[in-house]
């Protein structure tokens, strides 16, 4: 009996060859610089990954079809597939509930685009909502108007359209399932026309056996695999219980620890070979678009190697990621190529697989089959503290706990800035004690915490789970104790009182409110009471319209006794009173509002009568540019004697804050110095103020105070007690 092509392939001796770079018609190749997508070869697009490389470069945007490139004649579990985590949670998806959506997103492309670009498994979260099945984020297993994305049938119809148009493709759907309506899932899959592609439970392997051949699945049109997280539905609806058939590592931040690949709680251990599919998650608990390009590159490949060992030397079949196209070069597409290379022929890239009866003619190769050479992210930036013994302070020394670090430092990991954990600064330099307090207030610089109230882990005070961004990690008291001397607060009329809140359309909601303003103001009062020589500035983004609403809450908090009166504030760019005089008079609280009328009605200073301010958010982070925000006069308007520089992203991105709060911040302060008519900033507003690559925001303030007080590069170089431009140059060692 003759041996068929299928048998010959299965017994073929496979060899590896090197994948060569190729140029298509003179277009830009992988990692070449580019301006538009049109500059790049087919299968690439023009992308910027600031944490990974400078400028714009061509990176991969499409997959390699392993079935066409090599074969479709092996069991389904011998292939790897790109998986989009929360595939439905798409940037820009319009609200389908009539309520503005306030929740996180995980992808940028719609489901059809994801499938066309090579995603072959979709993770979807299904809920009972509005009498139907919806795709939704939730709290406590409930879907809300403001977290719902769309009815599940809309997404499932996109899947059906793709399967109909691509008769040799197989799609897997992995459900985080909160649907409890009887046969709710069966109905929505039936209504979407997907039952014709259903892969039946009876054909799924037991005890770690191989799955059917891909070619047989295609021939039988059994091209849709669906898994649920509810065990009972395997019997009641014929939907496979996920962890009967696959193992899965920990999702979220717990699945991103280098060198560690543990199973999630519901899954059996990864090395349980009675489950023949392996799913590897690699995405953050809170998705961070900016850093996704880094985590989807070498870090992902390293984790796949770690999970290979943890899974009993089995390569992953599914790789689940956020923002799947973002990368430093090959990204998730290269990761899946690597997996298919290992699975199909033991080579490091699927393009290297060659069988006796299958050559790889050039026309079958993807134009994007280039090796991935991600740019190095592990930059270590020198942070110099003038007149400070770095050996004593152990700045940037490796560490394990905070206790390993000297006073004023803590142990911190900045994955985008350096490897491992290192000692970085955690506290300020008191310029008043170090140098003097006998100059005008506008001759000093102060660390300012943007949205100081929007704190990680702050419990809900409304009874509704909070669903909004945060900007800081420390409480107000901790911020003040660590050296913040100006706080940015957003005040709103809410629940019959004044609250601190994020908003939409100028309105505070139950799910965006943080706490009553009086709670924060009482922390400030306690600090001022305990520190009689300190001055605090509060800068209000003010949406309070209740008559005398702010006056009442400041009075109730006991803060009016520290109030710096509007009548004492300088006009036309004159100097402010001396700090020592402000302290002597106990006028140690400066409050500014964004509502002009309150200067006359409540005696609260209108911010832009007294200071200039640069653009906030992403618009204020463009290298070499420091424009004023719309409400402020130009930065070089010297009739305003205070200068505020914002340097934070919109929205906040915690992992990259350590980089932006370091050298990038120092560079922006220099840019804004020129834009402000050669005036150094008095206030520097930052998110996650303690995160840095070394000196961070504290070093930035030391630099500013050095410039303001003595014209030196660091406040530690100023001669103590001096009010003139005298630098204290350290003696040579």
Image (cartoon, helix red, strand yellow):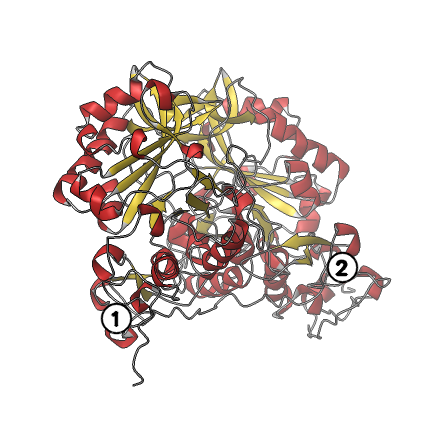
Label 2: element kind? loop
Please determine whether, in this image, residue 463 is positioned above or below residue 79: above
Q: Is residue 321 in view from this perspective?
A: no
Q: Which residue is mark 2?
A: 366
The residue at the far left in this view is 530
Residue at position x 44%, y 48% in the image: 284
Q: Which residue is mark 1?
A: 393
Looking at the image, residue 254 sits to the left or right of residue 358; the answer is: left
Q: Where, quadrant-wise, is the N terminus in this rendering?
A: bottom right
- Residue 720 position in % (x across, y down): 24, 65
Residue at position x 70%, y 66% in the image: 370
- Residue 600 position in % (x across, y down): 36, 20
- Asked whether the beta carbons under mark 2 and mark 1 sit within 8 Å of each other, the answer is no
Label 1: element kind? helix
Looking at the image, residue 530 sits to the left or right of residue 664; the answer is: left
- Which one is nearer the viewer's eye here, 351 or 74? 351
**Dot 2, crowdedness within 10 Å: few (<14), some or many (≥20)?**
some
Residue 184 marker: none
Q: Where, quadrant-wise, is the C terminus in this rendering?
A: bottom left
- Residue 479 position in % (x across, y down): 27, 46
- Residue 378 position in % (x across, y down): 48, 68
Looking at the image, residue 552 sits to the left or right of residue 21; the answer is: left
Mark 2 and mark 1 lie on one chain; the one further toward the N terminus is 2
Residue at position x 65%, y 57% in the image: 74
Q: Quadrant of residue 18?
A: bottom right
């Amino acid at each position: 009996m003759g041996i068929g092509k299928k048998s010959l392939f299965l017994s073929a001796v496979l060899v590896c060859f090197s994948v060569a770079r190729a140029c298509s018609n003179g277009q830009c190749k992988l990692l070449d610089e580019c301006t538009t997508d049109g500059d790049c070869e087919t299968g690439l697009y023009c992308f910027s990954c600031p944490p990974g490389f400078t400028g714009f470069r061509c990176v991969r945007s499409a997959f390699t079809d392993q079935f066409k490139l090599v074969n479709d004649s092996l069991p389904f579990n011998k292939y790897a597939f790109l998986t989009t985590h929360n595939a439905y949670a798409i940037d820009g998806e319009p609200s389908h509930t009539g309520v503005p959506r306030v929740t996180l997103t995980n992808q940028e492309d719609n489901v059809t685009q994801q499938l066309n670009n090579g995603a072959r498994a979709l993770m979807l979260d299904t809920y009972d909502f509005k009498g139907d099945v919806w795709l939704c984020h939730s709290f406590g297993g409930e879907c809300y108007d403001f977290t719902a994305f769309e009815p599940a049938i809309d997404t499932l119809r996109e899947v059906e359209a793709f399967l109909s148009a691509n008769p040799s493709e197989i799609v897997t759907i992995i459900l985080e399932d909160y649907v409890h309506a009887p046969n709710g899932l069966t109905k929505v899959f039936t209504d979407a026309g997907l039952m014709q592609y259903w892969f039946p439970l009876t054909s799924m392997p037991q005890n770690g056996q191989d799955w059917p051949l891909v070619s047989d699945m295609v021939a039988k049109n059994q091209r849709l695999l669906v898994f649920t997280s509810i065990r009972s539905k395997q019997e009641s609806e014929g939907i496979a219980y996920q962890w009967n058939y696959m193992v899965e590592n920990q999702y979220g931040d717990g699945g991103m620890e280098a060198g560690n690949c543990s199973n999630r709680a519901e899954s059996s251990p990864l090395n349980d070979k009675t489950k023949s599919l392996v799913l590897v998650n690699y995405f953050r608990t809170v998705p961070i678009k900016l850093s996704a390009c880094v985590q989807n590159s070498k870090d992902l490949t390293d984790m796949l190697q770690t999970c290979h060992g943890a899974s009993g030397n089995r390569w992953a079949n599914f790789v689940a990621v956020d923002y799947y196209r973002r990368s430093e070069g090959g990204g998730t597409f290269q990761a899946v190529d690597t997996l298919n290379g290992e699975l199909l022929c033991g080579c490091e890239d699927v393009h290297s697989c060659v069988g006796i009866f299958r050559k790889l003619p050039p026309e079958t190769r993807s134009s994007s089959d280039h090796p991935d050479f991600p740019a190095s992210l592990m930059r270590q930036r020198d942070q110099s503290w003038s007149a400070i013994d770095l050996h004593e302070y152990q700045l940037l020394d490796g560490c394990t706990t905070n206790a390993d670090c000297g006073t004023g430092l803590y142990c911190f990991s900045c994955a985008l800035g350096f490897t491992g954990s290192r000692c970085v600064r955690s506290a300020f330099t008191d310029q008043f004690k170090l140098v003097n307090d006998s100059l005008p207030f506008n001759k000093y610089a102060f660390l300012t915490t943007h949205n100081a109230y929007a704190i990680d882990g702050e419990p809900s005070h409304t009874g509704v789970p909070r669903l909004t961004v945060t900007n800081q990690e420390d409480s107000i008291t901790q911020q003040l104790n660590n050296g913040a001397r100006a706080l940015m607060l957003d005040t709103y009329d809410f629940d019959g009182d004044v609250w601190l809140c994020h908003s939409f359309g100028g309105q505070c909601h139950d799910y965006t409110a943080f706490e009553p303003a009086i709670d924060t103001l009482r922390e400030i009062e306690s600090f001022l009471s305990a520190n009689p020589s300190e001055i605090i500035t509060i800068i209000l983004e003010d949406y309070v319209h209740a008559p005398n609403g702010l006056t009442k809450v400041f009075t109730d908090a006991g803060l009016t006794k520290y109030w710096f009166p509007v009548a004492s504030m300088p006009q036309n760019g004159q100097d402010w009173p001396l700090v020592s005089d402000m302290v002597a008079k106990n006028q140690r609280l400066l409050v500014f509002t964004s509502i002009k009328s309150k200067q006359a009605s409540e005696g609260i200073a209108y911010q832009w009568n007294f200071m200039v301010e640069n653009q906030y958010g992403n618009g204020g982070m463009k290298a070499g540019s420091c424009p004023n925000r719309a409400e402020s006069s130009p930065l070089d308007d010297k009739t305003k004697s205070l200068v505020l520089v914002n340097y934070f992203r919109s929205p906040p991105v915690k992992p990259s804050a350590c980089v932006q709060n370091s050298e990038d911040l120092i560079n922006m302060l220099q840019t804004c110095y020129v834009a402000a008519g050669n005036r150094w900033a008095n206030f520097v507003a930052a998110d996650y103020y303690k995160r840095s690559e070394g000196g961070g925001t504290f070093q930035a303030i030391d630099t500013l105070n050095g410039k303001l007080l003595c014209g030196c590069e660091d406040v530690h170089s100023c001669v103590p007690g001096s009010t003139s431009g005298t630098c204290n140059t350290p003696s040579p060692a």
